[in-house]
Image (cartoon, grey):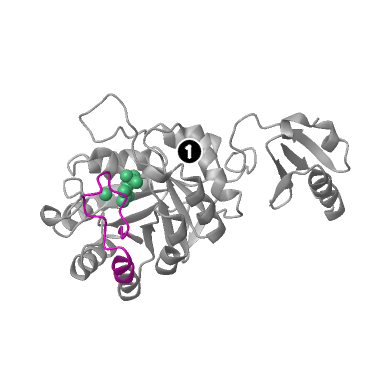
């Protein structure tokens, strides 16, 4: 249930609503806008309580039941767009933020070369997996803690914030210690223990879409992070399973405008895992920005032929820098910039 206070409502009036909700055993989340306060009343049985209980309280403008399963991620909860700030980089504002780097951290040389190249081309965040959630237990699982150390080194030497994936709820603090943005991968979108721990960390978090999940399931998963008080959530469309097998996954471009209508969270797109092939990545990256994405997550490897993971879908540094020129043109044509 969402209680919207009147413009300029007093602190006492807001407290009255909060106390009433708490006395009924509900949790609350407050959203203080510039001139309005909105109180989200959360609990599995809010549906059993009449909205009048809150509507009669002083300085309450309206009380709305949220029929959608997601609440905190919804537009109803927050009318304005959320902006996630990472070291002064704003994700969700006018700037389209490009995150790029190798699928997996493989060696110091590989990571530093990739970092230098993507920074030179204009990327503002370095990606690189240290813990890799591989479909097969026999595939390369990442350099793990040694990979985190290399990411720390690249962050310091190249001067770029770092995004890397966390796969285990017990490793959230460890991974957060070496990175600026936590990534929850497609396979873990509904790992609720992991979502809760990442929520507690209050770190900027990219939540990738589960490849067999609906947008509603995705936003409801985002609520797990938001409910812990972490409002720094960025959604990442990375392709879904369909009957089509000429690409690795089907990039759901329509998810971008759908999310923009139903949620206040920033939306980025990973064209690399959707395409599965370097030749298809540029067109999908261009389409994502044209459709309103707030950023991209792109795999770039200094030598894709030698990559231990996802070489076929990785761009070379020169392909990436050519793509960046095109992306800038598209961003500026829709009043944004890179
Ligand atoms: C990744 O970005 O490193 C990755 C594994 O992607 P996804 O979780 O989307 O498969
Ligand atoms: Mn990959």
Residues rendered magenta in the picture: 127-150
* Left or right placement of residue 194 versus residue 72 in this view: left
User: Which of the two residues, 18 or 62, is positioned nearer the viewer here?
Assistant: 18
Q: Given the current orientation, which residue lies at the most extreme left position?
A: 305
Number of other residues with Cα within 10 Å of mark 1, as a class: few under 14, some 14 to 19, many 20 or more: many
Vertical placement of residue 74 versus 125, above or below: above
Q: Let me know if residue 116 appears in the view.
A: yes
The N terminus is located in which quarter? top right
* Left or right placement of residue 52 versus residue 180 in this view: right
Tag 1 secondary structure:
helix
Vertical placement of residue 277 versus 252, above or below: below
**Residue 152: x %, y % from top left:** 35, 71
Vertical placement of residue 31 versus 280, above or below: below
147 drawn magenta:
yes
* Left or right placement of residue 265 versus residue 251 in this view: right
Q: At x 29% / y 50%, what residue is drawn?
A: 298
Figure disc tally: 1
Q: Let me know if residue 83 appears in the view.
A: no
11 drawn magenta:
no
The residue pinned by badge 1 equals 218
Vertical placement of residue 9 versus 149, above or below: above
Q: Main secondary structure of the magenta part?
A: loop
The C terminus is located in which quarter? bottom left
**Residue 174: x %, y % from top left:** 43, 66
Q: Given the current orientation, which residue lies at the most extreme bottom position?
A: 157
């Amino acid at each position: 249930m969402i209680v919207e206070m009147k413009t300029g409502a007093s602190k006492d009036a807001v407290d009255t609503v909060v106390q009433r909700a708490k006395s009924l055993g509900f949790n609350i989340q407050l959203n203080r806008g510039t001139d309005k306060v909105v109180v989200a009343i959360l609990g599995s049985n809010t549906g059993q309580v009449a909205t009048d209980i809150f509507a009669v309280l002083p300085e309450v403008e309206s009380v709305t039941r949220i029929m959608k399963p997601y609440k905190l991620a919804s537009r109803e909860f927050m009318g304005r767009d959320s902006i996630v700030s990472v070291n002064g980089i704003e994700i969700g504002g006018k700037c389209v933020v490009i995150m790029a780097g190798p699928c997996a951290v493989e060696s110091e040389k590989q990571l530093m070369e990739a970092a230098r190249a993507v920074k030179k081309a204009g990327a503002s965040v370095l990606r690189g997996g240290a813990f890799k959630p591989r479909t097969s237990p026999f595939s390369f699982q990442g350099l793990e803690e040694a990979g985190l150390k290399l990411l720390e080194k690249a962050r310091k030497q190249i001067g770029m914030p770092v995004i890397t994936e966390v796969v285990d709820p017990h490793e959230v603090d460890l991974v957060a210690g070496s990175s600026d943005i936590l990534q929850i991968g497609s396979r873990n979108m509904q790992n609720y223990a992991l979502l809760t721990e990442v929520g507690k960390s209050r770190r900027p978090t990219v939540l990738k879409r589960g490849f067999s999940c609906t947008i509603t399931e995705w936003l409801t998963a985002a609520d797990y992070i938001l409910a812990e008080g972490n409002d720094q959530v960025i959604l990442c469309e990375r392709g879904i399973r369909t009957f089509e097998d000429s690409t690795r996954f089907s990039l759901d471009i329509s998810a971008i405008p759908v999310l923009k209508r139903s949620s206040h969270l920033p939306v980025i797109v990973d064209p690399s895992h959707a395409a599965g092939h370097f030749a298809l990545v540029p067109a999908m990256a261009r389409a994502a920005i044209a459709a309103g994405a707030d950023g991209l997550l792109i795999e770039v490897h200094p030598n894709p032929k030698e990559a231990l993971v996802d070489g076929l879908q990785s761009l070379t540094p020169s392909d990436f820098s050519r793509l960046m020129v095109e992306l800038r043109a598209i961003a500026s044509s829709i009043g944004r910039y890179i």
